[in-house]
Image (cartoon, rainbow, N blue to C red):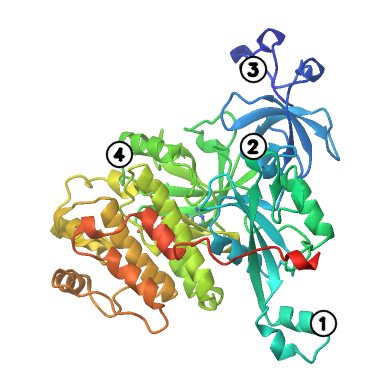
Amino acid sequence: MGICYSLDNQEEGRPTSQANQQNRAYSTKIPTKARPDLPTYIALYSYHARTEDDLSFEQGDHLRILDNTRGAWWLAELLLSKNHIGQQGYIPSNFVAKLNSNESHLWYVGRIPRQAAERQLMNNHNSIGSFLIRESESRQGDFSLSVRDVDDVKPLIFLYFSLLIYKTAAYKQGLTSSEHYKIRKLDGNSGVYIAKRVVFPNLQLLVQYYQSNADGLCCQLTSSVAQTENAPITEGLSYRDEWEIPREQLTLHREIGSGQFGCVYEGQWNGTHQVAIKQLKKGMMDSQDFLREAKIMKELKHPRLIQLYAVVTVSEPILIVTELMPNGALNKFLQTPVGQTLSQMELMSMAEMVADGMSYLESKNFIHRDLAARNILVGNHNICKVADFGLTRVMVGADDYQPRDHQARLPIKWLAPEAAHYNRFSTKSDVWAFGIVLMEIITRGRVPYPGMSNTEVLEKIQIGYRMPKPIDCPEHLYNIMLECWQSQPEKRPTFETLMWQLEDGAPESGYREAEMFMR
Ligand code: ATP
């Protein structure tokens, strides 16, 4: 169990290559007592070892980091845990945070827009007083506190009820709102406060104070907002970051879908980790071309993109290993009974996640070329991630295709006119496709241009036709779609703009001050 360490190599804290080749027992552990400077981290999520080099740990465990020089996987030792104290092994660095840092608290959510914070607070798992702290959008370095509260407009309805009945009724009927407070910093970073009369050395103490006493806030803080996301995706399958893996390491369990490239299976890597395995049809891609492209795709890492883990390309069929998304493709998910009952707020949140992922691709100058709801995958808590980016480029014949020859397999209804007619793909043709995705989302999975053939769509788009606004589609959302469908690509917005437009500009207004008189 573990890695063989050479004491000579301790300074760098790296395993020797010889050690890598030997059996993987920790013959010599890093003597942590000799390194009091090593920082302590706390586990934000549990992690179960996937290889014998890994270290399993539970949420809340304390770990000492022995080597953080190997990118996304760090060598660590368990310090405080229900089991295996003293054990060493590799851990995914995005599962831990420095002890007592802001990031180590569940209430700290980093830089998310105000509307996203509100949506998170309105999650059914939260109650009155649930809260989060986020980085301020308008003033870098400042923070905002968002709290779930009872809606203060509604109390009139319940005027005759006792406070307890009112609160229960209001809660059950979803009559809740969220309040936002700016957390300001004293000059020189010497303290933080909401109301200047009570200043705290750090956010943690500020939270503790308002958890014991509302002191002017709309209500006393209770618990951290419920987590809507599961543990993050690790960078690669293990610290070794093997890209080309042996076919034998994969077990295909059941087919979960198929597309123009081949079949997709739910399976396991190394008998430990659930993954999705796409098995490409023979002759679909040149393996060298594919490998070149896949290497670029692997470097694209963002919480709203499907993480590519590994490939098998040495022989056909080529296999692509990615993270597994339990709710499958977005278009199908929206057609399910669950999808059909999603609120507009939830649908908008899904659209924002897609824009977020696409905005990242845009920043990397990477063109998706096949953005459509079928290529967006849905995980737990309706988390959406963009999939299949770049794959169409390496399809055999993709470089020299003539639209007429290939129309049968082109996703015509998602293609911008310049892409359909002149094979001109760009981030702006992705933006056009995003407009179609918005329509798919708001119509809960309806096929675009219902009743129209591909040829008809191509012809009508050229003469200015655009899909009409569905009855229940908000005006501002339809306007965003029309922006995406501008004939001239350069007039279409960027994904970054789209993201903020969908979040409604996220103005930093609507803040409350802690009420001084309530002390
Ligand atoms: P096309 O090949 O035209 O892009 P497609 O995206 O539907 O169509 P695939 O990417 O092969 O084709 O996926 C087929 C189906 O497999 C998807 O619709 C989805 O239901 C399922 N699937 C694909 N990847 C995953 C994944 N990582 N996790 C869960 N399900 C997946």
Ligand 1 found in image quarter:
bottom left
Query: Which badge, 3 or 1, is on the more N-terminal residue?
Result: 3
Q: Count the marks: how many? A: 4
Mark 4 residue CB less than 8 A from any atom of ligand 1: no
Q: Secondary structure at mark 1?
A: helix
Callout 4 amino acid: Asp
Which x, y percent locates residue 40?
75, 31
Query: Which badge, 2 or 4, is on the more N-terminal residue?
Result: 2
Could you tell me how far apart the alpha carbons at marks 4 and 1 are, in whole angstroms? 69 Å
Please, which residue is most extreme toward the bottom here?
160
Query: Which badge, 2 or 1, is on the more N-terminal residue?
Result: 1
Could you tell me how far apart the alpha carbons at marks 2 and 4 are, in whole angstroms? 59 Å
- Name the residue tied to disc 3: 15
- Name the residue tied to disc 4: 286
Query: Which badge, 4 or 1, is on the more N-terminal residue?
Result: 1
- Name the residue tied to disc 2: 188
Residue at left 72%, top 68%? Answer: 218
- Name the residue tied to disc 1: 163
Q: Nearer the viewer, mark 4 or mark 1?
A: 1
Callout 1 amino acid: Leu
